Amino acid sequence: MEVVVELVDVYKHYLMGGQTVRALDGVSLQFRRGDYYAVMGPSGSGKSTLLNLLGCLDRPTQGQYLLGGTDVSTLDDDQLSGVRSSRLGFVFQSFNLIPQLTVVENIEIPLIYQGVSPRQARARAHEMAAMVGLSERLEHRPTQLSGGQQQRVAIARALTNDPLVILADEPTGNLDSVTQHEIMDMFDVMSRDGKTIILVTHEDDVAHRARHVLHLADGKIVRIETSEDRRRRMGLAGGTA
């Protein structure tokens, strides 16, 4: 399968209080089209830094980031903004919807940024709203929706530009268990449809839904395991407890 994301010997260092923090320390990774990864690790392991780099919200101190074959680590801010709006879809724990806009207006934002005509953007937004079961809520504002409905809007918005990669940061963190399962079912569907998904989580139940689980610690990759490997290991741990 086509490699859509590649990190080559990536480092990200910060200076804090006169000390160098090695947030990422020599990470090399490949994600192929249709891959579904959960990223896990303790606080300070580098999860957020990794997601920020993959989302073109930050640049590596050293190393290459290839997205769809383009080295985006060399692009300027305007070019990175273009990459974010055209090639990436984001789903956040806090939804990040614009409260003044309606459901349909929130969904069509990525297309407006790309210069798509208002008529085409609105038609695509209607299509995405129907896909996530919100056709009856098009004129509602985020404050009139439940948390699960807001996250559905965020997922529709993330998919509206047909991105190369979906990046999700604790997408079920603000949801109850029933709604969490509904949202993860949607990620399962996206994965089966061939979307590349990279999801940061600290919840085992969420990580189990991914096909691969990537573990970080101290800015390094500790291991990568399949969901089956993880279930087997967790089952064995439970059996010996």
Image (tube, helix red, strand yellow):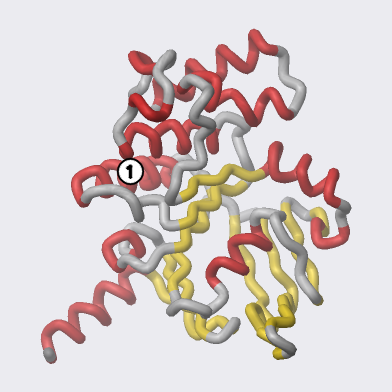
Give coordinates of residue 35: x percent, y percent: 51, 56
Q: What residue is rendered at 53% in x and 31% in y? A: 98
Residue 127, image x and y in percent?
A: 48, 18
Residue at image coords 76%, 22%: 115
Residue 155 at what x, y percent from top left? 46, 37
**Helix or strand or loop: what does disc 1 sit on?**
helix
In terms of image quadrants, where is residue 62?
Answer: bottom right
Residue carrying label 1 = 183
167 up-or-down from 121: above or below: below
Does 100 sit left or right of 15 as displayed? Answer: left
Name the one closer to the observer, 30 or 40: 40
**As displayed, is residue 87 above or below residue 239?**
above
Q: Is residue 3 visible?
A: no
Residue at 36% over, 47% down: 188
Q: Residue furthest top?
A: 119
Give the side of residue 156 with respect to residue 123, left or right.
left
Report how many numbered discs are placed on residues in the image. Answer: 1
Q: Quadrant of the N terminus?
A: bottom right
In front of the other: 29 or 118: 118
Q: Quadrant of residue 90?
A: top right
Quarter of the image containing the C terminus? Answer: bottom left
Q: Nearer the viewer, residue 222 or 110?
A: 110
Looking at the picture, how far across and down is residue 198, in whole percent? 52, 57
Determine whether 94 is above or below 231 in the image: above
- Please say if 141 is above or below 67: above
Write the residue at 49% across / 16% down: 126
* 10 Å crowding of disc 1: few (<14), some (14-19), many (20+): many
Choose top left, top right, bottom left or bottom right for residue 105. Answer: top right
Please state which amino acid type lies under the numbered disc 1: Ile
Residue 186 in view of the camera: yes
